[in-house]
Image (spheres, helix red, strand yellow):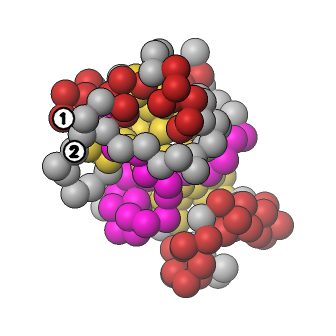
Amino acid sequence: EDVSSQNQVKASVQRKIRQSIADEYPGLEPVLDDLLPKKSPLIVAKCQNHLNLVLVNNVPLFFNVRDGPYMPTLRLLHQYPNIMKKLQVDRGAIKFVLAGANIMCPGLTSPGGVLDEKVEAETPVAIMAEGKQHALAIGFTKMSAKDIKAINKGIGVDTMHYLNDGLWKVFHGKILTSASLCLSAGVAAVQ
């Protein structure tokens, strides 16, 4: 779970990353230049388990696994809560989500759970919780919301990042340990 490399990317790679993020999260368009300034160096930290972190001023803002879509960190999502599609789990699922568990279909379909019918399979989503204001986790849907509702069994969302995991504990640009920079959820997401 250590950082294997941390490099400032070339301008062409930086443009590609910015464009990919702009395409995935059009709601960030007005603040993208503030988040990813063209003149500031963009650092990509590569961790084991095919996890990449995008850092600006030593602060992780986005991550991806196996060159998949970029996802915002929870801290960034809390600043801009409307940039991702949202699914909501019921109160009973909260403790499991906070422990890093994947989101099971019944937690999304029971009373208190909310599904956005427009969410397709393999979509990055914010995981909200009944009665809570901020997202608890960020995940990647394994099936569409319609299938989650119809099948109502098994894992509906792979949890990629959750409150109090290694990435959450990186604060104010200070990295607690090199291992904490890598998502503890990254191991589960790749298996």
Q: Mark 1 Cα within 10 Å, few/some/many (few <14, many 20+)?
A: some
Label 2–label 1 contact, CB within 8 A:
yes
Q: Which amino acid does label 2 sit on?
A: Glu
Element on which disc 2 rests: loop
Drawn side of residue 128 relative to residue 121, left or right: left
For residue 185, the mark is none
The location of residue 90, given as percent across then percent down, is 25, 35
Q: What residue type is labelled 1?
A: Arg
The location of residue 26, given as percent across then percent down, is 61, 71
In the image, is residue 79 part of the stretch drawn in magenta? yes
Q: Front-most of 177 and 121?
A: 121
Drawn side of residue 171 relative to residue 149, left or right: left
**Label 2 belongs to which residue?**
130
Part of the protein shown in magenta: 67-89
The location of residue 43, given as percent across then percent down, is 61, 58
Q: Mark 2 Cα within 10 Å, few/some/many (few <14, many 20+)?
A: some
Residue shown at 58% from the left, 15% from the top: 191
For residue 91, the mark is 1
